[in-house]
Amino acid sequence: MDVADLLVEALGRVGPVLHGTVDGLPPEALTYRPDPGANSIAWLVWHAARGQDAQIAHVAGVEQVWTARGWAERFGLPFTARATGYGQSPDDVAAVDVPGDLLLGYYDEVAAQTVAYLERLQPDDLGKVVDESWDPPVTLGVRLVSIVDDDVQHAGQAAYVRGLWERRTGT
């Protein structure tokens, strides 16, 4: 197994968790928050997709799926097109109120763009510095591991919130 296969495998586990979490949920479940400061399933899925989209587009040198394929307009969120969810307030979290098929459609397109990029990677690419604003500077390998880590965590959080919703509603 080469590095590209390993990363495709790791990120390929996120989509099924997100689909299993979102599929079949009513709108009120997607926006449910266990307390006013918590994240909703809708926000967690959107944020996972946005973070992956923005970071992969940057390292791949391509436009983000969010803007290139009209997802920003379809979502109609009250944020700038650059927003990824990082540092957002509870009010911003509440603003992500969109249907599950929209969330999953966007995530799936981001995942496809990510796989297309990862399949081109060579082992030597991983040592390339992609962000000098950190000390030490961030390499492509470190950035890709960070994307996997973020997406796995957010997918798990979304699944957990679904479990809380189901216990609360008895569904």
Image (spheres, rainbow, N blue to C red):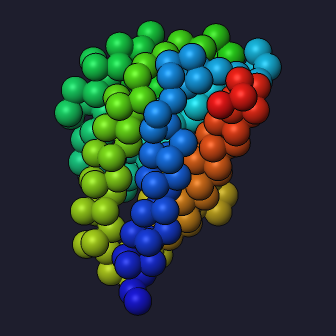
Q: Is residue 34 above or below residue 157?
A: above
Q: Between 41 and 53, which is closer to the camera in this rendering?
A: 41
- At a point 28% along the width and 19% down the height, the residue shown is 74
The answer to whether residue 86 is visible is no
Residue 166 point in image, percent of width and height: 68, 32
Q: What count of labels does the image hold? A: 0
The C terminus lies in which quarter of the figure?
A: top right
- At a point 57% along the width and 17% down the height, the residue shown is 28
Q: Between 71 and 160, which is closer to the camera in this rendering?
A: 160
Where residue 114 sits, quadrant-wise, is: bottom left
The answer to whether residue 112 is visible is yes
Q: Is residue 128 above or below residue 59?
A: below
**In the displayed structure, does residue 21 sit left or right of residue 135?**
left
Residue 72 point in image, percent of width and height: 31, 23
Residue 3 point in image, percent of width and height: 42, 81
**In the displayed structure, does residue 164 sit left or right of residue 98?**
right
The N terminus lies in which quarter of the figure?
A: bottom left
Residue 147 point in image, percent of width and height: 52, 55
Q: Between 79 and 76, which is closer to the camera in this rendering?
A: 76
Outermost residue to the front: 170
**In the displayed structure, does residue 74 sit left or right of residue 83?**
left
Outermost residue to the left: 69
- At a point 43% along the width and 19% down the height, the residue shown is 98
Q: Is residue 120 above or below residue 84?
A: below
**In the displayed structure, does residue 153 sit left or right of residue 140?**
right
Outermost residue to the bottom: 1
Where residue 66 sits, quadrant-wise, is: top left
